[in-house]
Image (tube, rainbow, N blue to C red):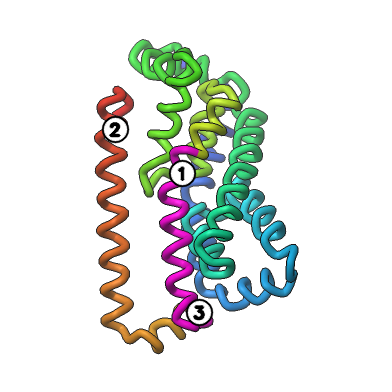
Amino acid sequence: MPRLEPRLWLTGALAAAWFTLPLGFSVLLFARIADVTDWLRGHGSSGAAVGAAAFAVAAGLGLMPTYAQAILMGWVFGTAVGSGVSVTGYVGGALIGWSVSRLVAGDAVRRFIDGHRTWGVVRAALVDASVPRTMGLVALLRFPPNSPFAFTNLVLAATGVRFAPMIVGSVVGMMPRTVFACWVGAQGAATGATDLGDLMKKQGPMAVVGGVVLLVAALWVMQQIGNRALKSAGLR
């Protein structure tokens, strides 16, 4: 068995961390959503800028998933402003995540992939295509709701996707699910609830469960659309 480069081990460890950490921190976020809301609103007119900066750092370092933060921004700022804050946040997060990934992975992953013919073909289809096609493929990878933001940053950077197509494709691909998540958060805040427990009390268990079912159904539809598009593009 050939010896793996140290950078491959480091990249694997980073991938594992970025796959597991966001879920735990998202649970913590929703458990403390009232405190976080008070903290952001306490910054007054600069609250949106603080929210975008915090979003970028948390997403870029793989600590928090973008969907959880988008729901929070919708909860705090409403759909329109929350969407703007979230888009700014994940653009900054993509910059941070891509930079960290390039620093950790270097060219080790690209060399490893190119050493396997089938994997190399897939990488070439993503990286060596024209700029518009690369943007489109990145957008497709970002579109499904279950596309892990930090992990995808790592994959794109490690396989050699250039920065500009990555950013543009990320903005386009993530926009629909981000706006939807902000809308969900805004709808929850519109009830006057201060946190999820208060929301349950105000709306009743059945209303909350029904809302969750509709949310899951909408996300499932988006997931199916994304999967079919990726399959058509030869990435699934």
Q: Is residue 51 above or below residue 166?
A: below
Query: In the rendered structure, which disc, 2 or 1, sits on the residue that comes first in sequence?
Result: 1
Could you tell me which residue is drawn at 56 percent across and 33 percent down?
Answer: 167
Residue span colored magenta: 172-195
**SS label for mark 2:** helix
Residue 131 percent location from the top left of the image: 50, 18
The disc at residue 174 is: 1
The residue carrying pointer 3 sits among few (fewer than 14), some (14 to 19) or many (20 or more) residues within 10 Å by Cα, namely some
Q: Observer-nearest residue: 43 or 231?
A: 43
**SS label for mark 3:** loop
Instruction: Name the residue that disc number 3 marks.
Output: 195
The quarter in which the C terminus is drawn is top left
Marks 3 and 2 sit apart, C-alpha to C-alpha, by: 37 Å
Q: Observer-nearest residue: 74 or 35?
A: 74
The disc at residue 229 is: 2
> Of the residues shown, which amino acid type is indicated by label 1?
Met
Q: Observer-nearest residue: 210 or 187?
A: 187
